[in-house]
Image (spheres, rainbow, N blue to C red):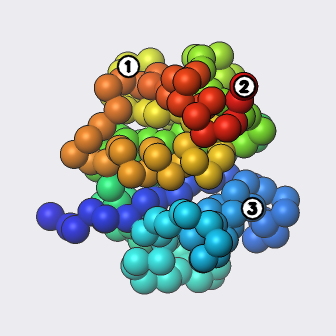
Amino acid sequence: MAYRSGTYVAFYAQGTSDPTESDMKYYNTLRMWDANKDFDFSFVNSHEKSRAVRDSSTKATLEQVLKERLRNSKNMILIIGQTTKYDRDWVPMEIAYSVDDCQIPIIAAYPDYDSILAPDQLSSLWPKALADRISDKSARVIHIPFKQEPIKAAIKQFDHDNLPSGALVYYTRETYIKWGLIK
C-alpha cells in the first residue's frame, strides 16, 4: 500500500495551458498560498510527489500517472466552477477513480461563494461522475467555498481514514462566522 500523504487537486483545464482561461488559476492559488510564508496554509501536493508528464505524453501515460498520484493521496480537492460539469475527459476519471478505487474523500471547493450551507442546491454545477456518486451515496464529500480557511480545515480533517459522514456534508453557519466569511 502506498504512503497516502498528499492532497490531489482536480480541476477543469478546458484544454488550455493558459491558467487565466480555466480553473487552473485556482490550483495555482493553492500553490501560491502554500509557497507564501505570510499565509498559514500548507498542503502536500500530490502532483509534485510523482513523476512529471509532458504535454506530448499519450493519454494512457497521463491517465496512469494521474491514477498513481490518486493512489498516493489522502484526499482530493475538486474545484467545481461554472464549467466543470462540461469536462468529459479527466475530471470524470479522477472522480470515479478517487471514489471507486482509492476510497478517498472529496473536498468539493466552489469558487465565488463565501459559504456552502445547502450543497444540494449546487447540483447543477456537478459533473455527472460526482452527481452519480452523490446520488448512490458512494462518495464521501465535504462541500466548501474556495476560501483558504475552509480548505485548510478540510485538508486537515478529512482523509482516507477519516471520511465525511456522507455525500452532502458541509460546515455550519457558526463555523463560517468564526472564519469571518459571513456575518
Q: Which element carries disc 1, helix, strand or loop?
A: loop
Q: Name the quadrant of the C terminus.
A: top right
Gap in Å between the C-alphas at discs 2 and 1?
34 Å
Q: Dividing the picture into quarters, in which one does residue 64 lie?
A: bottom left
Q: Is residue 115 shown above or below 155?
A: above
Mark whose residue sits in front, 1 or 3 = 3
> Can you give x and y, in whole percent of width and height, for residue 7 in the image?
43, 60
Q: Is residue 1 above or below residue 126?
A: below
Of 8 and 64, which appears nearest the observer? 8
Element under label 3?
Answer: helix
Q: Which residue is mark 3?
A: 25
Circle 2 Cα neighbour tier, 10 Å, few/some/many (<14 / 14–19 / ≥20): few
Q: Which mark is residue 183?
A: 2
**Residue 148, percent across and down?**
62, 52
Q: Which amino acid, mark 3?
A: Lys
- For marks 1 and 3, the one nearer the N-term is 3
Look at label 1 and name its amino acid.
Asp
Q: Is residue 53 left or right of residue 81?
A: left
Q: Which mark is residue 136?
A: 1
Residue 67 visible in the shown view = no
Mark 1 crowd level (few <14, some 14–19, many ≥20, 10 Å Cα): few
Quarter of the image where one finds residue 150: top right
